Amino acid sequence: MSRPNEHEPLVLGLETSCDETGVGLVRGSTLLADAVASSVEAHARFGGVVPEVASRAHLEAMVPTIDRACADAGVRLRDVDAVAVTSGPGLAGALLVGVAAAKALALGLGVPLYGVNHLGAHVAVDVLEHGPLPDPTMGLLVSGGHSNLLLVEDVTSDIRSLGATIDDAAGEAFDKVARVLGLPFPGGPHVDRAAREGGQVVIDFPRGLTSGRDMERHRFDFSFSGLKTAVARWVQAREQSGEPVPVADVAASFQEAVVDVLTRKALLACREHGVADLLIGGGVAANSRLRALAQERCEAAGVRLRVPRPALCTDNGAMVAALGSHLVLAGREPSPLDLSADSSLPVEQVSG
Ligand code: KG4
Ligand code: ZN
C-alpha cells in the first residue's frame, strides 16, 4: 500500500445498496479506513435480504459507522474533500438512505458529491490493494446481486458490459443450493467449506449457456437457474429413495459447475478482446475453488489475475471511496445535489 500524500484529496465513500452499511476513507489510492456494519443476521431467518429491514438497518448504522471510520483513519469529518456514494444499482430504499446521507454531508461540509456505480466501485477497489488498473482490464463481478463480465477501458469513464446473468446471480445460486442442502444463509462460505470434503466430478451438473447455440447468442452471459434446479431435483430424488444425501459431493460438484463456467467465459472474453489482466470481484470472489481455478487457467492463458482480499470483495465503503477518488483525480464533474438513487443504474454509467 502506498503512503498517503497529504496533497491528494480525502474522499469519504458510503455504500448502502444491499445489506452492508459501508463507510470508507481513501486518500488518493491509499485506504485509510473501511468500516462496515452488516444486517445479514437480521435477514438470515428469511433466507434472503429483506429490503425494508435492510433500509432501517442502514438508517441506524449510518452515523455510528461514519464515526468509526473517522476514528480508524484518525481524521475529522471536516477534513473530507469529497463525498462519494453508491447511487445504483441496488435496493431502492437502501440506496436512498446512503444517497440522502451523502447529500447532507456534502452540503454541510461544502464539498462536492459524487454518485457512483456499485459495479464500477467493485472494480475500482482493487487499486487500493494492487495499484493502478491496466487499461483495459477484464472485470468478472460475482456476488449475491450480480454476475457480470465487464470490459474496463477506463474505470472513471469507460466500462462496457460484455455479458451478465440472464436469471440468478452466482451468489444467489450458492445461497439457494445451500438452503437445499440445509446449510445456513448466506450459503456461499458454507458450500465452499463443505465442498472441500467432496468430489468435484462425482455429479455431472449442467453448465448453463455453454452449448454451441447458446455460445452464439449468449457468449458472455451466464445462467445459474437451471443448475440450481438440477441440484434441487438430484437431492430430492435421493431423499425420496431414502438414501443419504452426500452433502460434500453435491456442494463440490455444484461449485465446480459454477466456477468452471465463470472462469471459462472470463478467459474467453480476455482472449477475444485482447485483454491481459483479469480482475475478479464481488462476494463470490472469496470462493476458494474459484480463486484456485482462475489462477490455474490464467497461468495457462498468460493472463495476470487480480483478486482483492475478501473484505474488499464483499460490499464495503472503501470501494465507493476508491472510485470517488479516481473521479476527483480525473477531474470528472461532480453530481448535482438533486442526485437520485437508481436501482437499475446501467453499468456503463460510472457516475451519477
Ligand atoms: O458482494 P456481496 O457481499 O453482496 C452482494 O452484493 O450480493 O456478496 C454476497 C454473496 C452471497 O451470495 C454469498 O453467499 C456469496 O457472496 N459468497 C460466497 C462466498 N463468500 C460469500 N460464495 C461462494 N463462496 C464463498 N466463499
Ligand atoms: Zn456488490
Image (tube, helix red, strand yellow):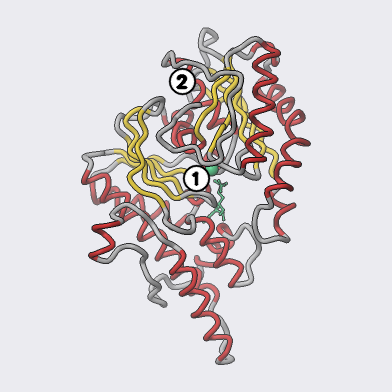
Q: Position of residue 7 (x, y in %)?
A: 52, 7
**Left or right side of 272 for 339:** right
Above or below: residue 331 compared with residue 117: above
Q: CA distance from mark 2 to mark 1?
A: 21 Å
Q: Nearer the viewer, residue 231 or 73?
A: 231
Secondary structure category for the residue under label 2: helix
Q: Position of residue 259 (x, y in %)?
A: 40, 59
Camera-nearest label, 2 or 1: 2
The residue to which callout 1 is attached is 282
Above or below: residue 209 compared with residue 352: below
- Residue that sits furthest to the bottom in the current view: 241
Above or below: residue 234 compared with residue 212: below
Q: Mark 2 vs ligand 2: CB under 8 Å?
A: no
**Left or right side of 237 for 253:** left
Residue at 69% from the left image edge and 43% from the top image edge:
38
Question: Nearer the N terminus, badge 2 or badge 1?
Answer: 1
Q: Nearer the viewer, residue 121 or 68?
A: 121
Above or below: residue 62 compared with residue 140: above
Q: Mark 1 vs ligand 1: CB under 8 Å?
A: yes
Report the label total: 2
Residue at 52% from the left image edge and 72% from the top image edge:
248
Residue 337 sits in quarter? top right
Structural crowding at the residue carrying mark 2, measured as other residues with C-alpha within 10 Å and reported as few (<14), some (14–19) or many (≥20): many
Residue at 58% from the left image edge and 25% from the top image edge:
339
Q: Position of residue 289 (x, y in %)?
A: 44, 58
Q: Position of residue 164 (x, y in %)?
A: 40, 50
Structural crowding at the residue carrying mark 1, measured as other residues with C-alpha within 10 Å and reported as few (<14), some (14–19) or many (≥20): many
Residue 207 sits in quarter? bottom left
Q: Amino acid at mark 1?
A: Gly
Q: Nearer the viewer, residue 62 or 298?
A: 62
The residue to which callout 2 is attached is 327
Q: Amino acid at mark 2?
A: Leu
